[in-house]
Amino acid sequence: MPGFSSKGLVLVSLLGLLVLLLCSTSEAQSNQDCCLSYTKVRLPRWALKGYTEQLSSEVCDIHAIIFHTYSGLNACVNPKEGWVKKHLLFLSTDAIALVEEIQKGEPLITASCKEYVIHLVRRLQEKLGEKEDRKFYLFKGHSAEIIALSFNTTGDRIITGSFDHTVAVWDVGTGRMLHTLIGHRGEISSAQFNWDCSLVVTGSMDKTCMLWNAMTGTHIATLTGHSDEILDVCFDYAGQRIATASADGSARVYNAETKKCIAKLEGHGGEISKVCFNPKGTRILTASSDKTARLWDVATGHCLQILEGHTDEIFSCAFNYKGDIIITGVVTPALNPGPKIMASMKKLYTPRFGAKDHDIN
């Protein structure tokens, strides 16, 4: 057929099929534009533009959802069907409006990346559409970038740490801000709940770590001692100890009950960006810009092992669930030319011997 490409023919065929399906089942409207029956065709999500709800009344006999397609057609569907409920969840959150609202307070979402962010939101909608009881909440309250966020262990609270010097505690079920933790005089770098969700620990660029009551938002204590910015904080799994990592090249361990420093971990030749406990709470792992990670004894503060092998600054480290394997990660410029393109390289170690097991490609 002259003037038509193969892609054009496929598109016309698909639209024609959709028209036939809708027309064959959507003659379900009376003179009052009421749905009289439901279509048996499961409409594709990409074809839907919006919907209206028809309530059963003296005018209309049945409760129905009327899906509106981009081609201008309407389809009457049963609101009790699972696939209809999922489509409604997808349509009920306006991705464009949501991103535009976020963009007002977030300069990082520029015009050039707006469409990509909208695409990501829609992908999330599709993923969440697999559940019937999920909603989107826009957590608004901070006046600057959010740099840290974490769930509590029960999943009903979220904390967010911001460059506006505050930490906010949110209710997951309602999206409502419960508390604002005010006290730091610098940007927040890290925030975490303890295991039983009773405490929150925060680290800041003001060189201090603060302890808070998670239920009331009350400030409990300020943990001091570092001479430079605190870059990471964490609880052990029992919630009895707190570890801090600093740009001064040291890490510290505090007793969560007495608020006293019980160990100073010194030896790195550069700032420490990550700190974590092993599952038993007897060892601490640190990652540093000096291209090494170190394993420490919590009780004595002695360095047990120096994990070497990376050729660039280490930004992340973690134990596995059993605590018998360590993983470390660095960020280096990729071989591909281009702005801000980064590639991650990781290595595995055995904490017992400190020997490098293998690289992860």
Image: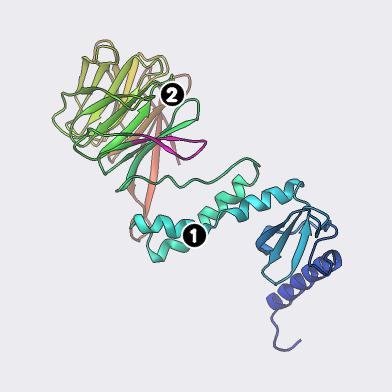
221 vs 285, left or right, is: left
Q: Amino acid at mark 1?
A: Ala
* Residue displayed at 21% across by 24% down: 222
Q: Is residue 268 above or below residue 281?
A: below
Q: Which residue is mark 2?
A: 325
The quarter of the image holding the C terminus is top left
Whether residue 285 appears in magenta in the rendering, the answer is no
Quarter of the image with the N terminus is: bottom right
* Residue annotated with mark 1: 97
The scheme the figure's colours follow is rainbow
Give the answer, above or below, for where 86 lies relative to 32: above
Compared across the picture, whether 26 is left or right of 242 comes to right
Between 102 and 14, the residue placed more toward the observer is: 102
Q: Observer-nearest residue: 111 or 135?
A: 135
Q: Secondary structure at mark 1?
A: helix
Determine which quarter of the picture holds residue 29: bottom right
Q: What amino acid type should be assigned to the residue bearing mark 2?
A: Ile
In this orientation, does residue 314 appear? Answer: yes
Q: Which residue is at a point 65% across and 44% down the rendered structure image?
A: 130
Q: Position of residue 78 (x, y in %)?
A: 78, 52
User: From mark 2 to mark 1, how far is it between C-alphas?
Assistant: 45 Å
The residue segment tinted magenta is: 168-179
Q: In the drawing, does residue 262 fall left or right of residue 25?
A: left
